[in-house]
Amino acid sequence: MDRRLIPANARVAAAFLRGKVEAPRYVSGTEKMVAVPLADLLSAPHGRRERQLLLGERVAMYEERAGWAFVQAEKDGYVGYLRFDQLEERRPATHWVIARASHLYTEPDFKSHERMCLSMGSQFRVIGETARFYETPLGYIPKPHLAELSKLARDPVEVAERYLGVPYLWGGNSIWGIDCSGLVQAACYGCGIPCPGDSDMQQANAGRVLAEDVPLRRGDLLFWKGHVALVAGKNKLLHANAHHMAVACEDLDVALARIEAQGSGPVVARRRLPTVKKDTR
């Protein structure tokens, strides 16, 4: 049992774990959502960042203690701690940010003050519209930057390419910083493909195993110990990496040689993501 996916600590456990995990108390959990542009999901209160959650992402909260919420993310099941003041009561979302980044404005006017900066993937409930803006409970967002949640891209690489140049950040999941598995997850979610949060989980569960004798194609995943990258085309690799300290696209042969030379060894797995049949965006 992977602790990253098991909503249980020394005091409580999710009710569905009764009989599987021993705990002093079992709780059903409370539906919450992230109320800030970006929240670190930590291994413990004041602990290490494990992943990040964006505005509007949904969680189940199993405990609130000393200002910290013990939660499980709905999108991938990742468990950790958020500051309780970063959460609010869950509301249904209708749209998400499909631009690399956007701003939330106080008025439907691009000259008005911006209220916050938004990362691609942030979710909102649209309650109205003007000629150029969608209205949300928090403010106004330019129409070209939002799409209905059901509007999905077809090509994970095209989604990942929007992050080119974004700084590398361990455990990052936003346009302000992202890591290798965060980039792959964002690329998959933009196409409606389920994807775990960490590279070892992706190696075990993302798509299907690709045999060594099958030629690589755009969108395939390559894995090393602790690293994952997307094949971006013929002899091209797209990944968030600590060599460039950014999301970069480079020659596959060059990347393979460098990664092996720096001690990460050869590719240990190859996987192929499912085909998205229709581009609904």
Image (cartoon, rainbow, N blue to C red):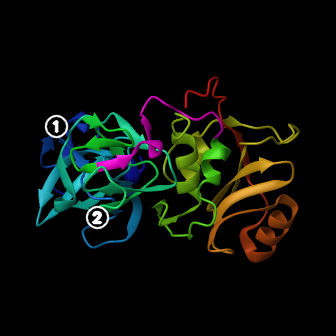
- Measured along the vertical axis of the image, is residue 87 above or below residue 29? below
Amino acid beneath label 2:
His
State the SS at label 2.
loop
**Residue 193 location, x and y as percent?**
54, 35
Pick whichever of labels 1 and 2 is earlier in the sequence: 1
* Along the viewing direction, whichever of 78 and 132 lies nearer the viewer: 132
Check the image and report above or below for 240 versus 19: below
Residue 71, x across and y down, in percent: 26, 51
Q: Is residue 62 left or right of residue 48?
A: left
In the rendered image of this protein, does residue 169 appear above or below residue 148?
Answer: below
Rendered image: mark on residue 28: 1
Measure the C-alpha gap from mark 1 to mark 2. Answer: 41 Å
Q: Measuring 85% from the left and 66% from the top, which residue is drawn there?
A: 254
Whether residue 28 is in magenta: the answer is no
Tell me if residue 12 can be seen: no
In what quadrant of the picture does the C terminus appear? top right
Pick whichever, 160 or 10, lies toward us: 160
The image quarter containing residue 252 is: bottom right
Badge 2 is on which residue? 113
Residue extent of the magenta highlight: 140-155
